[in-house]
Image (cartoon, helix red, strand yellow):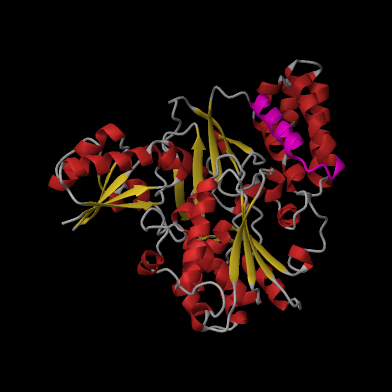
């Protein structure tokens, strides 16, 4: 009898020795004359337990972790005998971190072999596409609108409305573009999904193509994700061989194919128009809007451009029905959000749940507080351009409108935790410096404002007329917020102003100024 073992090939797991563990298990199995089959999966997202090894049993998959190479022999013995081991976690599906989640998008991540079309289909894959092939394009778009799905890349624009605009545009060629240029600090959901369940992205993009009449798609992946690039290219080739891409998809009249393009590391290329410029072979510089990409996008043609998580949510909607998705969440934030917990946190990783969970629940209950054991002082939500929230705002529900009401943004769902040793004036300076380095340079508020912002914060930190320079900084942030061409310059004031508002003592502000804030 062959013992089946599951070990992640996810970049996060490889970084902490997953490849070495796999080799050690093979050596231990050979020495014991035990037949093993090692399946390399994606990660389930419990990063503090990686590398996590799962063993197939009649009761389900039993997990061990975190496993080091020197643990391999003992773990293998425990797996064969079904005996006790200090690293034994019980059934993987019963681990509290996983049981508390509502996994729509990541339901297969860490479960299947990401290179196998057959494994994907065995776990419900391509059912959404098969149903879409029986529907009219208008009906597909209507389902996506009814689901309430909003762009998961940060802007939160209704996905179905974007598709409807492209579908109604008249053109001889239309494109589907996936923005996989995941550059925000503390975010890794796109990478995890591409490495752990790439076929769901392919399926979602193909459904979008059928809905709007596109025949060509591109996935724009950041160069820092070499494992994701390989995974997507292999999955695309496998999908072509199986008839899910190319001419006559699943025996239908539809034609659609996908290519992978790798970016060169510019943060601004996460902005959709700069990404399109890069795809066309030019420097990534933000375009003025209008015209919108839905009318005049890639190569001047109508283009659907969505984030990885947006496309990956679509197969669930088409398979299970729009209402099944819309019935989860709160307010105008429907469905689930894959939330990424990072920074100084005890239990970091990916946690997919319905909108409405509070920030405090995520940080304290799910994340377990800080890894240092010190009090949480601030969390930044939404990447390097997200606002800093103090503990006083931990009752804020994870919801687009709830965060906007408190001058914050959800962004791509990344949460970075800081303990009470953090210098918030230094964090504000980092935001301005980040903007100065990453600015494409097209508009003055972003290009010049960020540099002046760094200089002004340096004067504040040096106690050079702090009150006067704080007033200058506030005015500068106002100009950047309302005068910048894109969100890079427009959102940089969020971390700066929130740091000033909630942590004025780090800037040396007088009590009078604090009261005014």
- State yes or no: residue 285 in magenta: no
Residue under the image location 67 percent in, 50 percent down: 270
The N terminus sits in image quarter: bottom left
| Nearer to us in this view, 107 or 375 | 107
Q: Main secondary structure of the magenta part?
A: helix
Res. 313 in view? no
Image location of residue 453, percent across then percent down: 79, 30
Q: Quadrant of residue 103?
A: bottom left
Residue 356 placement, left or right of 292: left
Position of residue 511 relative to residue 93, above or below, is above
Residue 53 placement, left or right of 209: left
Image location of residue 511, percent across then percent down: 72, 21
Q: Write down the region rendered in magenta.
A: 424-444
Residue 31 placement, left or right of 412: left
Q: In which quarter of the image is residue 150?
A: bottom right
Image location of residue 355, percent across then percent down: 51, 55
Res. 421 in view? yes
Image location of residue 326, percent across then percent down: 52, 67
- State yes or no: residue 429 in magenta: yes
Q: How many discs appear?
A: 0
Position of residue 83 relative to residue 475, above or below, is below
Residue under the image location 58 percent in, 24 percent down: 422
Residue under the image location 72 percent in, 26 percent down: 514
Residue under the image location 83 percent in, 55 percent down: 288
The C terminus sits in image quarter: top right
Q: Which residue lies furthest to the right in this view?
A: 444
| Nearer to us in this view, 258 or 430 | 258
Q: Which residue lies furthest to the top in this view?
A: 463
């Amino acid at each position: 009898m062959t013992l089946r073992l599951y070990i992640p090939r996810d970049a996060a797991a490889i970084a902490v020795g997953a490849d070495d563990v796999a080799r050690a298990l093979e050596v231990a199995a050979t020495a014991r004359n035990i037949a093993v089959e090692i399946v390399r999966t994606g990660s389930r997202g419990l990063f503090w337990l990686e590398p996590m090894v799962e063993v197939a049993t009649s009761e389900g998959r039993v997990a061990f972790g975190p496993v080091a190479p020197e643990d391999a022999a003992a773990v293998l013995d425990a797996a064969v005998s079904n005996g006790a081991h200090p690293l034994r976690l019980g059934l993987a599906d019963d681990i509290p971190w996983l049981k508390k989640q509502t996994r729509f998008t990541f339901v297969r991540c860490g479960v299947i072999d990401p290179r196998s079309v057959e494994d994907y289909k065995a776990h419900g894959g391509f059912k959404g596409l098969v149903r879409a092939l029986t529907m009219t394009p208008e009906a597909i778009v209507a389902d996506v609108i009814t689901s309430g799905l909003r762009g998961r890349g940060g802007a939160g624009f209704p996905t179905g409305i974007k598709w409807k605009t492209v579908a109604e545009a008249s053109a001889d060629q239309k494109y589907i573009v996936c923005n996989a240029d995941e550059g925000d600090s503390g975010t890794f959901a796109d990478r995890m999904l591409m490495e752990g369940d790439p076929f769901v992205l392919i399926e979602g993009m193909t459904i979008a193509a059928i809905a709007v009449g596109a025949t060509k798609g591109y996935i724009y992946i950041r160069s820092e994700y070499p494992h994701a690039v390989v995974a997507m290219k292999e999955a695309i080739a496998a999908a072509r061989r199986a008839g899910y891409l190319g001419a006559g998809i699943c025996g239908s009249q539809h034609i659609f194919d996908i290519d992978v393009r790798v970016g060169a590391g510019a943060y601004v290329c996460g902005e959709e128009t700069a990404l399109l410029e890069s795809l066309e072979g030019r420097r990534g510089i933000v375009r003025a809007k209008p015209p919108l990409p839905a009318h005049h996008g890639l190569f001047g043609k109508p283009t659907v451009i969505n984030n990885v998580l947006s496309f990956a949510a679509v197969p669930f909607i088409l398979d299970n029905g729009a209402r099944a998705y819309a019935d989860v969440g709160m307010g105008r934030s429907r469905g689930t959000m894959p939330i990424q917990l990072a920074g100084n946190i005890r239990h970091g990783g990916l946690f997919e749940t319905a909108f409405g969970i509070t920030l405090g629940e995520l940080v304290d209950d799910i994340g377990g507080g800080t890894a240092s054991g010190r009090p949480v002082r601030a969390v930044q939500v939404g990447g390097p351009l997200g606002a800093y929230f103090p503990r006083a705002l931990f009752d804020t529900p994870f919801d687009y409108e709830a965060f906007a009401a408190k001058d914050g943004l959800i962004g791509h769902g990344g949460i970075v935790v800081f303990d009470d040793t953090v210098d918030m004036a230094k964090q504000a300076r980092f935001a301005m410096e980040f903007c100065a380095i990453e600015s494409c340079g097209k508009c003055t508020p972003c290009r010049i404002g960020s540099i002046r912002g760094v200089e002004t914060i340096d004067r504040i930190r040096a106690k050079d007329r702090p009150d006067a320079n704080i007033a200058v900084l506030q005015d500068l942030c106002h100009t950047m917020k309302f005068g910048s061409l894109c969100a890079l310059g427009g959102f940089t004031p969020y971390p700066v102003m929130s740091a000033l508002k909630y942590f004025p003592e780090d800037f040396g502000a007088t009590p009078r100024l604090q009261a005014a804030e």
